[in-house]
Image: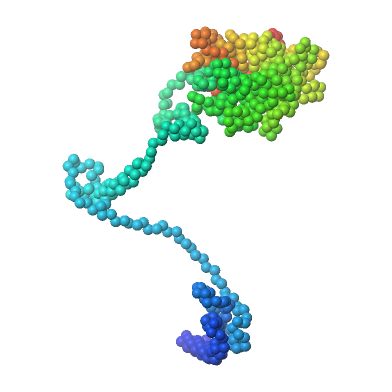
Amino acid sequence: MLPSGTSAAERRREELEKKRQKLSQLREAREQRRPALLDLKRSESPNNLVGNTRREIDDLVASLVGERRAPIETSSVSSRSSTPVSIAPSTTPQPDAPQQQVSQQQPAAEVPERVQPNLVSAEFIIFDVAPKEKQLYNKEAQTVETWTQPEDHGFGDDEVDDDEYGAPAPEKVAQSTGTDAATDQLQPTISNEVEHIRDLTEEERRAIISSEQFMEFFDQSSKVIERALNEKYDYLIDYSITNEGEVHDDANKNVKQYCQFFDEKWSKNRWVTDLDWCPKYPELVLGSYGKNPNAINDPDGLVMIWNLHLRERPEYIFHAQSDVMTARFSEFHPNYVIGGTYSGQILLWDMRAKSQPVLKSPLSSTGHTHPVYSMAMVGTQNAHNLISASTDGIVCSWLLDMLAQPQEVLDLVLTGSKTEEVAVTTFGFPANETTTFWVGTEEGAVYQANRFDRAGSKAGISPLDSYRGHSGMITGLHFHPLFGASDFSDLFLTSSVDWTVKLWKVNKSTTKSATAPQTVAPLYSFNEADDYVYDVKWSPVHPALFAAVDGSGRISFYNLNQETEIPTTVVQATGNAGAAGSTAAAGAASAAQSTSTGVKALNKIAWDKEGKKTAVASSDGHIYIHDVGEMAIPHAEEWAVFERTLTELEANSASNPF
C-alpha cells in the first residue's frame, strides 16, 4: 500500500518499475530454456523436423504466455496444408520451472495433455439487404436525335410538365422512347412463338372435348357461371339514396312463383313422386321421378337435386332400376340421399360418388317386396335409424351403412279383420318420438302402431284406437312440428282422395278396455278442394299455417287463426306465373284456369327449413318453387290464438262429430 500522500505520478512510476522487473524475469527464463530447446531439435529425425518445429514453437509460445495448448497431431505432410486454428492465449501466468523440466525429461511425442483453451461464444446478426438495382445504360432511351415541335393546340392538362420552350419533359421522352425500344426487341421473340403454335387437328380436338377430364371441368365450371348469373343482386345499388316516400304494394304479401325446375331430357314424360329440402344447404331441393314410357334406354327411376341458383339443369342426377316412389336427404349425413323404389328396394346415393347407388337392399324376402311409398329418419346424430313401410304392411328399420338386411322387421296386421293386412300408404312420427307412429291406409283409416312391446301393449297395430273419417285412400299424413312457445305435437293432418283434409288430435286416454276399441273422430274437416287432395304439410315456423295440393293444380294455404272454413290463399301453379287469391271465389277461378291452361295435378308439397318457400311437384315432371311472403311470418301472439282456436274446434267436434 502506498502512503495516502503519494502523488499520481509517483504511483505511475512504481507501476512501470514493477512491469520492467517482470519483463526482465521473462527474458531470463527464456534464455535459460533456449539450450534445452536446441538440443531437442538436434536429437529428432529430419522427417519429423517440420512437425517438431511447430510443436517447439507452440511450446515456446505457451511457456512465454503462461498456458500450454493441446498438441496438434500432424501425422503426414499433407495434414500440414490445412488451415491452422488460432486460439486466443490466456493472460494468466504459470510457473516456468515445471514446464522446462517436462521439456528436458520427456520427448515431444509423450508430452502430457495440455489444458484446453477457454471458449467464448459470440452472436452474429445477419441483415438481408436487397441487392442494389443495376442501372443499365441505354443510349437510345437517353438521347433523342431529332425532335419536331408539335402544333400549338393550346395549353391543356397534358402539357403541364413541358418546359418553358414547349419541349416535352425529359422523363416523358425517356419513357416513350424506352417503351418503343422494348417493343421492338420483343417483336422477334413474339413472332417466333407464334410461328411455333400449331392448330389442332379435328381428331385431336374431338379427343380433348370427349375426354372425361374435360367434361368434368366444363360441367363444374358452367354450373358456377350459371349460379352467378342467376343471382338477383343489384350490383349498382346506391346505399346513399333513401326512398322515404316509397309505397309498398300489398300484393307483395301474397304467394308468388319463384322459379320452376324442368329438364327437357330427364323430366319429360315423367311424374314427380316425392320432394324434400336439404337440411344443410337451403338452396337444394330434391325430386324423385317415375318411369318414362317413351325412353326404354333411360333408367326407370331418377332422383334429381335442383339448386335455386342453377335453374336450367339439375345439380346432381341419380339413377335407379325401378321407379323411385319416395326419396329424402339424410338429416345426419349431408352427402347421402335415400330412396325407396316400386320394387321394394332401399337405395343409398352419395353426392361424392357417381350416379349409381353406393348401397342397396337385396330383392329378397328379408326386406320389402312391395312398393315403398313412405320413409322417415328417427333418432339422434349418434343413434338413428331409417324407417320404411311398404303397401304389404311391412315396416323395416335400417342402418344406412348396412342395407344387406333390416335391423327390425314389423308386420302390421289387424286383429279380427277379414284380410288382417294393413296396406300402408303413408305414416308419420310425432316430434321426439321414435317408437310410436301412425299409419294411413288404403281403406281410409289411420292406426296407431308400436315398434316394440310396451307395458300393456304389444308391437304392431294398437287395437284400442282407430281414426276414421275419410271415405277414400289416405295420401298424406303429417304431424305438427315442435317449435315455439306451445307444444302442438299431438296434432296431425291427413289428406285423401275423398277431396278433403282432416285435422286430428292424438287420443291419450288410458281408461279404455282392450275388448272395446274406440273410434276417434277428426277435430275438423276442410272440404274446399275440387279434386283429389294428394298431400298436406304444416308450416315449420307458423303454428296455424298449413298447405295442401290437389289434382286441379291448386295450392291451398290455410291459416286457422284467420279462417277455418276456406283457405286464406289459393295459388294456381302454371308454367309462367302463379295466380293468388284470398277467397274461395279466387280458388274457383284458379280451378277454371287449370282446365284452360292444361296444368297437371300437383301431388307433393314440401316447406323449406325457414318456412318461406314451398316446393310443389307436378304429374308432368315440373317442380314449382313459391315464395310464401309475409303470410309465413308468425307474430308473437299466434300460439295463444291457436290454442283458443283448437279449444273452439274441440268443442264443436264434440257437439257435431264429422
Query: Residue 272's x, y, as percent?
Result: 58, 19
Residue 193 relative to residue 512: left or right: left
Which quadrant is the N terminus positioned in?
Answer: bottom right
Looking at the picture, the colour scheme in use is rainbow
Residue placed most toward the observer, 600 or 242: 600
Residue 243 relative to residue 479: left or right: left
Which quadrant is the C terminus positioned in?
Answer: top right
Q: Would residue 285 be seen by someone viewing this image from the given angle? A: no
Q: Residue at x 48, y 63 (%)?
A: 125
Q: Residue at x 68, y 26 (%)?
A: 361
Write down the quadrant of residue 564 in the picture. Answer: top right
As drawn, 176 above or below 306: below
Write down the quadrant of residue 393 in the picture. Answer: top right
As drawn, 445 above or below 81: above
Total marks placed: 0
Query: Residue 308's x, y, as percent?
Result: 51, 26
Q: Residue at x 25, y 52 (%)?
A: 140
Q: Would residue 210 be seen by someone viewing this image from the given angle? A: yes
Residue placed most toward the observer, 636 or 526: 526
Query: Residue 62's x, y, as percent?
Result: 55, 82
Residue 492 relative to residue 515: left or right: left
Q: Residue at x 59, y 19 (%)?
A: 290
As drawn, 583 above or below 286: above
Query: Residue 615's x, y, as percent?
Result: 56, 21
Residue placed most toward the observer, 7 or 650: 650
